[in-house]
Amino acid sequence: MTGARAVWVSGRRWNQDRHGRPLAERPGPTRSRATASPLRRAATWTIRPAGWQLLAWVVALAALVLFLAAVDVSHACNHPPPPITHPEPGTPRQSYCSTVQGVGVGWLCFAAPLLVLGVGIVALRRAAVPSVVLAVAISASAVVNATIVSDLRAIQIVPGINA
């Protein structure tokens, strides 16, 4: 009979392995990998990289959202609501638009976030879930930025006249 619980006939006790060593002194895990605790098995898992095709779709969808957000920001700065032609100086929209126009809407609202996404995907070693979370976070921040710019005041509010 072989195994960890040999019988007296073989010259070993029940608490010795097949080499005669006590079971407590055996090197390695005492349980097989299949019966190890779930936490231990989870700690030994490795993150498999996502395929480039999935990441290409993630980047393409993020690029589309970033492009639409950049167009919305450009439209909000260059074509404010109907009563006025350009944001008045001293308003929050004019301050934001002068900053964005100085750097460039295409660079600030489209290329820079897309570059951050690309570097992030490479830094995350192509892990699928963190890459998608990063893409969603960057896209959501671009949409929130475009929404806030569209809601900024473009004219000075004078109490009693146009309030």
Image (cartoon, helix red, strand yellow):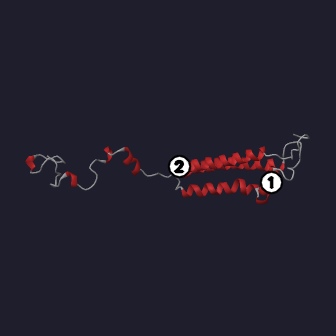
In screen coordinates, is 63 left or right of 48? right
From the top left corner, tell me how far across and down residue 123 is, in percent.
55, 58
Q: Which mark is residue 158?
A: none
In screen coordinates, is 107 left or right of 35? right
Residue at label 1? 95
**Quarter where residue 84 is shown:** top right
Circle nearer the viewer, 2 or 1: 1
From the top left corner, tell me how far across and down residue 15 is, in percent.
16, 48
Residue at x 72% of width, y 53% of height: 109
**Image quadrant where one finds the C terminus:** top right
> Could you classify mark 1 by the number of other residues whose Cα lies within 10 Å: few (under 14), some (14-19), or many (20 or more)?
some
**Quarter where residue 147 is shown:** top right
Give 8 or 68, whichever is nearer the viewer. Answer: 8
Question: Residue type at mark 1?
Answer: Ser
Residue at x 74% of width, y 50% of height: 70
Task: Give the spatial CA distance, label 2 vs label 1.
Answer: 39 Å
Question: Residue type at mark 2?
Answer: Ala
From the top left corner, tell me how far across and down residue 61 is, in percent.
64, 47
Q: Which mark is residue 128?
A: 2
